Image (cartoon, rainbow, N blue to C red):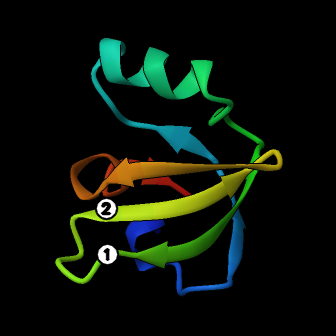
Amino acid sequence: MTLDILKTNSSATIKKLNLPSDRKRRLQDMGVTEGTTVKHIQSNFLKSLYAYDVRGTVIALRYEDICNIEI
């Protein structure tokens, strides 16, 4: 399963980041690492950006990225 299927107000644990090294590093710097629990807060009306609570901080992720994050 990937992060894009997570419903609003639901939480999941990150299992693997299947991203190119530059994007993977950017997410790891923001705290999105394997074993981290994330909560889907909301998405914009175009479904291109998604907001997640990661370690007490809200971050926005692109749809292209969340489709490559296994939960």
**Circle 2 — which element?**
strand
Q: State left or right for residue 70 relative to residue 55.
A: left
| Residue in view at x 39 percent, y 69 percent | 4
Q: Percent position (x, y) of residue 47? A: 24, 75
State the residue lying farthest toward the left.
46
Give above or below for 64 relative to 42: above
Counting other residues with Cα less than 10 Å from the Cα at mark 2, is it few (<14), some (14-19), or many (20 or more)?
some
Please state which of residues 44 and 37 is positioned toward the viewer in this rendering: 44
Quickly name the residue at label 1. Answer: 44
Q: Tell me where residue 11 appears, x and y as whole percent.
A: 72, 73
Q: 10 or 42: nearer the eye?
A: 42
Residue at 40% in and 50% down: 61
Q: Which mark is residue 12?
A: none
Relative vertical location of residue 34 with respect to residue 14 in this rendering, above or below: above
Mark found first going from the N terminus, 1 or 2: 1
Q: Nearer the viewer, residue 35 or 8?
A: 8
Secondary element at image label 1: loop
Image spot of residue 14 (x, y percent): 64, 50
Given the image, on which type of amino acid does mark 1 rest? Asn
State how far apart marks 1 and 2 are (Cα): 6 Å
Residue at (82, 49) in percent of width and height: 56
**Is 6 situated left or right of 19 in this image?**
right
Q: Is residue 39 visible?
A: yes
Q: Quadrant of residue 8?
A: bottom right
Label 1–label 2 contact, CB within 8 A: yes
Q: Position of residue 41 (x, y in %)?
A: 60, 74
Res. 49 mark = 2
How packed mark 1 is, by other alpha carbons closer than 10 Å (few <14, some 14-19, many 20 or more), is few
Residue 35 falls in which quadrant of the image? Answer: top right
Left/right of residue 18 with respect to residue 27 in the rendered view: left
Q: Amino acid at mark 2?
A: Leu
Determine if residue 2 is in view.
no
